Amino acid sequence: MSQKIYLIANWKMQLLDNEAVDLTTKIIPEYKNINNKNLELILCPTFTALSKVGEIIKKTDLKLGAQNVWYHEKGSYTGEVSPCQLKELGVEYIIIGHSERRQNLNETNEEINRKINICLDNQITPILCVGETFDERRLGKTDLILMTQVSQALEDIELKKNQKIIIAYEPVWVIGSGQAIEPKDAEHSAQVIKQTLLDFFDKEVIEKNIFITYGGSVEENNVKEFIQPGLLEGVLVGGASLSIEKFLPLVHRLSS
Ligand code: PGA
């Protein structure tokens, strides 16, 4: 059986409810036509659109993802959303530690670790985002940053047979820039991440339960270059997932 390819559409805070619904409605028949069981397409709308998008994709093979979660299941946490509440809406994946949250909201590796834990406790797959800034790369610190982020995020995490983690390698400086990094650099980072994982998990667990994807200015013309079976097994797409005109050709390329 061939391995799954993950296509994660991160809609960030870009779409109003009706726009998210419209886009989803257009994606559904196309995805059905493609009929590629190995392509796992995960739509990650903003919190407010989760319910409606979840409702529309309920009877399809599309998956619902959220962009954040709080690390408690219930309680006095004004403004936060719990994994149980997200699960209720059909959420199966949650993006954790996106660089926009690390930078704008000072999200720490410790918080990210707690969020990953609570996702797994609730049978939700975390999509852990890691990646270096431009300055860190310039100073030759990329590998160290990746090792640190991965180690701290996954500290004391145990994976049961049916649980998985996706790690999205996203060089911060190319997100939204229109210029992705060289695929060989993404492959190198994926190797560094894999090597770091060996400190925490058995080889077999890494092979079967942990998947690395690339994100950062992925579009129709470069998407295939970032798929390397066994190493890079999907992509996280922001800008190019926001319109059907850009997204569909990308989906077709990926499944061809
Ligand atoms: P981008 O965003 O595809 O617009 O660069 C990627 C991301 O959300 O990390």
Image: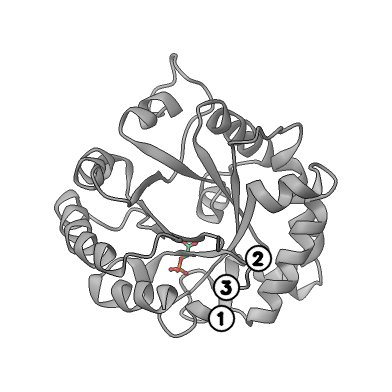
Label 3 residue SS = loop
C-alpha gap between disc 1 and disc 3: 6 Å
| Label ID, residue 225 | 1
Of tags 2 and 1, the one toward the viewer is 1
Three-letter residue code for mark 3? Ile
Location of mark 3 (residue): 227
Question: Percent x, y for residue 146?
Answer: 74, 57
Location of mark 2 (residue): 133
Name the residue: 29% across, 73% down.
248
Question: Percent x, y for residue 10?
Answer: 40, 57
Label whose residue precedes the other's in the sequence (2 or 1): 2
Answer with left or right where residue 98 lies relative to residue 76: right
Three-letter residue code for mark 2? Thr
Three-letter residue code for mark 1? Glu
Q: Is residue 220 above or below residue 132?
A: below
- Label 2: few (<14), some or many (≥20) within 10 Å? some
Question: Percent x, y for residue 30?
Answer: 23, 67
Name the residue: 32% across, 47% down.
46
